[in-house]
Image (cartoon, coloured by chain):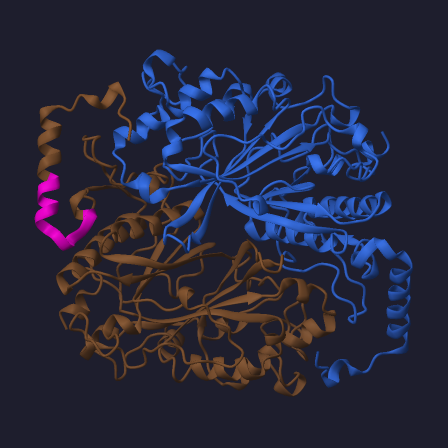
Chain colours: A brown, B blue
Amino acid sequence: MERTPKDAGITRREFLKWSAVAGSGIAMGAAGVSAILGLSQAPGKVSEAAGAGQIPMYGEHQAGIVTPQQTYMYLASFQITAADRPAVIGLFRDWTRFSDLSTRGGTMQSGDNKLLPPSDTGETLDLPASRLTVTFGFGPAFFSQDGKDRFGLAAQAPRYLKDIPRMPRENLDKTLSGGDVCIQVCAEDQQVAFHAVRNFIRLSTGLASLKWLQEGFISGGTAGQTPRNLFGFKDGTANQLHQTPEGYQDVVWAGEGEPSWMAGGTYLAYRKIRMLLEVWDRTPLSDQEDTFGRNKTSGAAYGAKHEFDPVDLGQLPANAHVTLAKQSGKLIHRRAYSYTGGIDPRTGHMDAGLLFISYQRNPDEQFLPMLKLMQSQDKLNEYVSHVASAMFACPRGLREGEYLGQVLFEA
Amino acid sequence: MERTPKDAGITRREFLKWSAVAGSGIAMGAAGVSAILGLSQAPGKVSEAAGAGQIPMYGEHQAGIVTPQQTYMYLASFQITAADRPAVIGLFRDWTRFSDLSTRGGTMQSGDNKLLPPSDTGETLDLPASRLTVTFGFGPAFFSQDGKDRFGLAAQAPRYLKDIPRMPRENLDKTLSGGDVCIQVCAEDQQVAFHAVRNFIRLSTGLASLKWLQEGFISGGTAGQTPRNLFGFKDGTANQLHQTPEGYQDVVWAGEGEPSWMAGGTYLAYRKIRMLLEVWDRTPLSDQEDTFGRNKTSGAAYGAKHEFDPVDLGQLPANAHVTLAKQSGKLIHRRAYSYTGGIDPRTGHMDAGLLFISYQRNPDEQFLPMLKLMQSQDKLNEYVSHVASAMFACPRGLREGEYLGQVLFEA
């Protein structure tokens, strides 16, 4: 890297600071680059304006689960490469600190030594918190991989956590599926959401590698309206049925038979579903409506007048999306986003679809039977292709002062 | 496709309508699928709420050029496959109608025949206009390809239109570069922007093929603030220098020596610039600031106090971004967006960067010398890679009743 005259003069004070930080980094070994660079210890700053639109990070449950959906989402999946438990704990401490700071609209503050990289990447310096939420989850391999208890946590594995079993008609890309740890970042502002996910990635240097990263958006979900998916249909109407504390208790929050750290936690189920827009757009409206079992414009189920009217199975095509969802008799808490991503170079078609995410307390009883039924029978299968899959267990919410996973590591 | 009992009964009336439409489509031949399906003739509907946040489509200049930047952008490039001039004109008429409708927040209205695909894909049925703008441009090959005057327009080629010449250090992907026609769609709402670009693609079925599609976002560009790029720096400060009608006349609007249809038009220069975030994020703050020649936090150039203070070349590193921009002595109108797009599977690094777009009246005098200087000397080159490139000529604004390109075809 070239050096210009302006920064060639290193003051003694700067030199000592640099040496001291570098030295402590070397001594810390496994704690990685973030420690070497002092990122994890960087003080944070939250300006008053930046604090606007905050969603509290601490509480009984993690934010970003029953939080009303923000406009943007990034979902990142990591593979832990840290060799041992203390190194993982170090990473989780850093992630917790940054999560706390960024949900308050803050940025990590650099010291006055410009010979170090800035502690914060800086693209949100002028931006408010923007309803940022950060939601963490652990994949099956985090507890046990190839029969190996990697971090001494095998006995703490959540009751229902496993990779989603093979389903009919799926076409999964393994490089875009699974992972040890996921971080879901949502915000009303895409730059704010990206800033957070990028700095989580950065803080993981040497301790975890990014396995995949997906981004999505919704629109029209405000004021109680159900957002439309890229097929132009309202999808997720049934979410309204359980939006009470009791409903969430029934549908979302785990507890019974779980290790204590999962009480108040939940399971995140993820499917990346490519939607064949070109095919769909040439399909008669009657077929489109039969596929969902709803009127396209109003969102009302067949035989009903309004979107939220009760669904009458007698009025519906047997293989319609809403029929099967209803028939399964199960509720899930849906929190999906649309994605668009340029062109599939093999076909010239648009690469777009749905990042399906749902939260449920028991995937064996709720999500998996519904998925299996739909993958087998749903008329929608003519127009979609499931290309990625994952399941993560999300621990209960953090109390102030706790780090992510503390309740698990200290169980 | 399966048929459920509900729609098996085709009424005679429906059958006749279907036959009539199909028949007229067949008779029209080259006019393509959109005509067969009646899309181009579909009446539009604009509800009162949908009209909120409109930017007029008609005027002396096209919208989306000096329009204050919206939050989202899609840039689509097409290759015309239509065989002849009337077919191209038919496509442009359809595009114009849909552009008019969507900038007013409207959607194409389907008839009551559900055996036809809906005229509109429907995902914006509940959404307002959201400051949507549509900007069209023509690439060099639209006028002449391999020495062939494809549509009888070679004599009307704009004076400075050509592919951007090969530059030092670039690493272009030809499949993501160039094209016959570009459509830039911008809006405050990503779903509204995607809806428009998707329906432009749909209307082009059989007449043009989508060559590439890029999407980007900005944040923080409101209230006169310069948005920060993904390196965390304010970029585009110099735009403020010409934001007057006279300034735009000097910098943006073409005229002199141009065919008449380009008077009030402009040239769009596009570079997709991948930013090596992981490298940048480990670079000392002093190097980052030397690279731009600006203080990261305040945005002030070296030697200045505030972002908009005059730049003093004597205070700046010779190869800093702002030095070279200033030294070139040229102004351009910058309208760039950031992009993020998951992971580069070859490296595991984030695929993110800048969709650089600028508008200028004379690329030979303004954009190309600046680009050449920067590609040769800019310190920023250590951290970026130019991966795609294109230039398009954007005709003057439409008058009501005109179709896109009419002024060109009838010149």
Quadrant the C terminus of chain A occupies: bottom left
Residue at 70%, 81% in the rendered image: B2
Residue A261 location, quadrant: bottom left
Residue A299 location, quadrant: bottom right
Front residue of A174/B89: it is A174
Q: Where is B251 relative to B343, above or below? A: above
Q: Is residue A130 visible?
A: no
Residue at 43%, 81% in the rendered image: A368
Q: Position of residue A36 (x, y in %)?
A: 16, 45
Which residues fall within the magenta stretch?
A: A21-34
Residue at 17%, 62% in the rendered image: A83
Is A294 left or right of A115, judged from the image as shown? right
Find out whether residue A23 is within the magenta segment.
yes
Q: Position of residue A247 (x, y in %)?
A: 40, 76
Find out whether residue A341 is within the magenta segment.
no
Residue at 63%, 53% in the rendered image: B195
Front residue of A289/A368: it is A368
Quadrant the N terminus of chain A occupies: top left
Q: Position of residue A101 (x, y in %)?
A: 26, 48
Q: Is residue B339 visible?
A: yes
